[in-house]
Image (spheres, grey):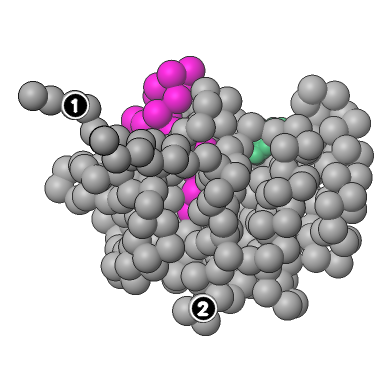
């Protein structure tokens, strides 16, 4: 008798390791309109847990918070006294989106004192303005999910890098997405300008809407984070990894198969 096929992994089985986050992922995440995958949210909040274990502190920030789906998960991963900053134009698809954002935060357990809502345009934002919003504290985690053009991503990446804490992590949404092929150009140009930054991991997509994310960190933190990710998400490591020529990084996926060859 042949051995049973292994159970396929689903995002519902992936945990961040932070009870408040995992409760929200189980009961609230899918009910909040948004475009980030649950798989990515679990791993990103797992990274926030790892930061706390390393003693890395600071606020989190998101460019493009929309109705709060991903933002609420990040906010639940904060340690005491830390805050989450949500930045958005809050004008799409209508001006009431900001009310829905506030209502979703309250409904899913993120009170006003744990968050800052900032209706602003990241294209014209200065690093000092962003830091002032955070009381001078450098964010330990920034999710970039705003305008999806090459120029806008380049600007958002420069803004994020200029305010990031030394052990900070930047996560980019909609990478390798068939609808946004030029975003990859912006990432490669950015990595060329910032040799101190590298891609820590690629979080594979769940669907075309819940797309792939890249996780970036400073090269000096790469090994420490990689070790922790390997330990926590061993079952999700796609064996071949990603080649950034010459740098290699982890690929985390719900589907870790390789092509069958003779
Ligand atoms: C794809 S949605 C974000 C989805 C959300 N992060 C989630 O996980 O559900 C993109 C958001 O970026 C915002 N946005 C686009 N350009 C922006 C800009 N220049 N500054 C701030 N926000 C922007 C849009 O208003 C929109 O709400």
Residue 208 percent across, percent down from the top left = 52, 23
Residue at which label 2 appears: 53
Q: Quadrant of ligand 1?
A: top right
Q: Which residues are magenta?
A: 170-190
Q: Residues within 10 Å of mark 1 (few under 14, many from 20)?
A: few
Query: Is residue 47 depicted above or below 191 in this figure?
Result: below
Asked if residue 18 lies left or right of residue 93, the reply is left
Most extreme residue toward the left is: 262
Residue at which label 1 appears: 260
User: Image quadrant for the C terminus?
Assistant: top left
Q: Residues within 10 Å of mark 2 (few under 14, many from 20)?
A: few
* Nearer to us: label 1 or label 2: 1
Q: Nearer the viewer, residue 37 or 78?
A: 37
Residue 72 percent across, percent down from the top left = 74, 52
Residue 257: quarter of image: top left
Q: Nearer the viewer, residue 40 or 145?
A: 40
Residue 253: quarter of image: top left
- For label 1, the SS is loop
């Amino acid at each position: 008798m042949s051995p049973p096929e292994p159970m396929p992994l689903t995002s519902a089985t992936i945990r961040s390791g932070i009870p408040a986050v995992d409760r929200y992922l189980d009961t609230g995440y899918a009910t909040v309109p948004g475009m980030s995958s649950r798989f990515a949210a679990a791993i990103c909040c797992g990274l926030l847990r790892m930061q706390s274990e390393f003693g890395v502190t600071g606020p989190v920030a998101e460019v493009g918070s929309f109705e709060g789906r991903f933002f609420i998960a990040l906010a639940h991963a904060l340690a005491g006294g830390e805050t989450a900053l949500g930045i958005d134009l809050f004008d799409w698809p209508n001006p009431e989106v900001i009310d829905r954002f506030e209502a979703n935060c309250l409904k899913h357990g993120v009170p006003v004192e744990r968050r800052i809502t900032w209706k602003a345009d990241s294209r014209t934002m200065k690093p000092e303005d962003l830091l002032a919003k955070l009381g001078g504290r450098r964010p330990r985690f920034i999710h970039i999910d705003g305008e999806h053009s090459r120029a806008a991503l380049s600007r958002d990446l420069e803004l994020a890098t200029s305010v990031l804490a030394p052990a900070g992590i930047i996560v980019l949404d909609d990478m390798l997405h068939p609808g946004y092929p030029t975003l990859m150009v912006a990432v490669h140009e950015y990595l060329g300008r910032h040799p101190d930054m590298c891609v820590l991991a690629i979080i594979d997509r769940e669907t075309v809407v819940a797309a792939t994310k890249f996780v970036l960190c400073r090269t000096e933190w790469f090994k420490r984070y990689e070790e922790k990710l390997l330990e926590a998400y061993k079952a999700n490591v796609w064996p071949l990894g990603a080649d950034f020529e010459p740098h290699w990084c982890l690929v985390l996926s719900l589907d870790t198969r390789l092509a069958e060859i003779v």
